[in-house]
Amino acid sequence: MSPRRLAGIGWALALPLALGCMRAGHPADARQAAPAPDSATVALYRFDEQAGVRCADAGPFRIEATAGAGTNVSYGRFGSAREFTRVIDSFVYAPDNPMFDARGGLTVEAWVLAHAFGQYEDTPIVSRWTEEGNQRSWLFGIVGDKTKPPLARLPSPGFHDGLVASGQIGQLVFAFQPEDASQPRAFVSTQRLPVNRWTHVAASYDGMVVRFFIDGRLDAQYATRGRIQSSAAPLLVGNYFDTRRLSTFSGELRLDVGGDDNPYYAFEGVIDELRISNQARAQFPETGTR
């Protein structure tokens, strides 16, 4: 067989593999670059499941989560990821666990690929937040367009108006409820996120300073003192609604009928490698910023 024909066969065999890597959007050593559980990790959702609604926790406490029917498995920044759509049943839910409480510090980080920014105040990436003041803990998301009628078909319920008052569309927002004060505190990043591009985002708090990181680089920091309120709120990814409406129907976790099903706060895009830590991180190995 001629060298030219051998080269052609080699190229044909290599092409599907190359295309797979390109579609997944990650380097050849992706797993080495992805975050790994360590002593500060509370939960790590890789979203590498190929099907179904179960979302495994690679962290030490194995706090398994469940995806709503409005999500899909998609190509991720590393392996697979969870794609969220603009419907009320698009979410990932993990029940309350005392390990989620930020006793000594907190870092929330993920790879996100936003297809669009929200029409209303914000689209949470992940939160432990409710409309019960004594059960609020923290929220990490992206500021939305804050559209009002008549440009918006429906008015927003306004749950997060106060959290994003100083924010502009596309900026990150991090809010927390101090345990010794009645009013939540909210902060926004300097940069705005791009759409349709993978971006590593993180927010950390050590009891004295809130910091935002974008693609591993420090974006903004704010001095503020206090502990984050402990809470019985569950972890909710990619959406915001009253989680007391959730019920199991036909083996799936869904919102019960009869409530407001407009997806005001639904995240549109893909989330991968979501990690919650119990300390304020400043280094993110998945972005090569040791």
Image (cartoon, grey):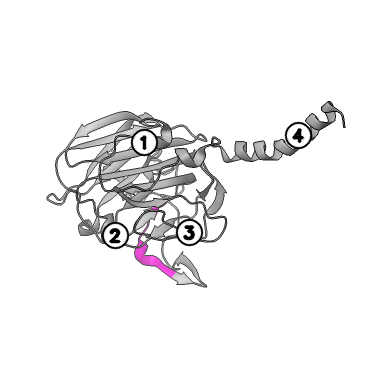
**Quarter of the figure with residue 63:** bottom left
* Residue corresponding to mark 4: 10
Secondary-structure class at tag 4: helix
Q: Is residue 274 left or right of residue 115?
A: left
Going by the numbered disc 4, the residue's amino acid type is Gly
Residue 191 part of the magenta segment:
no
**Which residue position holds label 3?**
89
Spatial distance from mark 1 to mark 2, Cα to Cα?
27 Å
Label 1 or label 2, whichever lies nearer to me, is 1
Asked if residue 150 is positioned above or below residue 64 in the image, the reply reads: above
Q: What residue is at 26 percent from the left and 37 percent from the top?
A: 187
- Judging from the image, what secondary structure is the residue with disc 2 in? loop
Q: Nearer the viewer, mark 2 or mark 3?
A: 2
The Cα–Cα distance between marks 2 and 3, rounded to whole angstroms, is 18 Å
In the displayed structure, would residue 27 be above or below residue 254?
above
Q: How far across and how far down the image is residue 83, in percent?
A: 52, 49
Q: Which residue is mark 2?
A: 233
| Amino acid under disc 3 | Asp
Seen in the image, is 99 located left or right of residue 34?
A: left
Evaluate if marks 2 and 4 touch, with contact meaning CB atoms under 8 Å apart: no
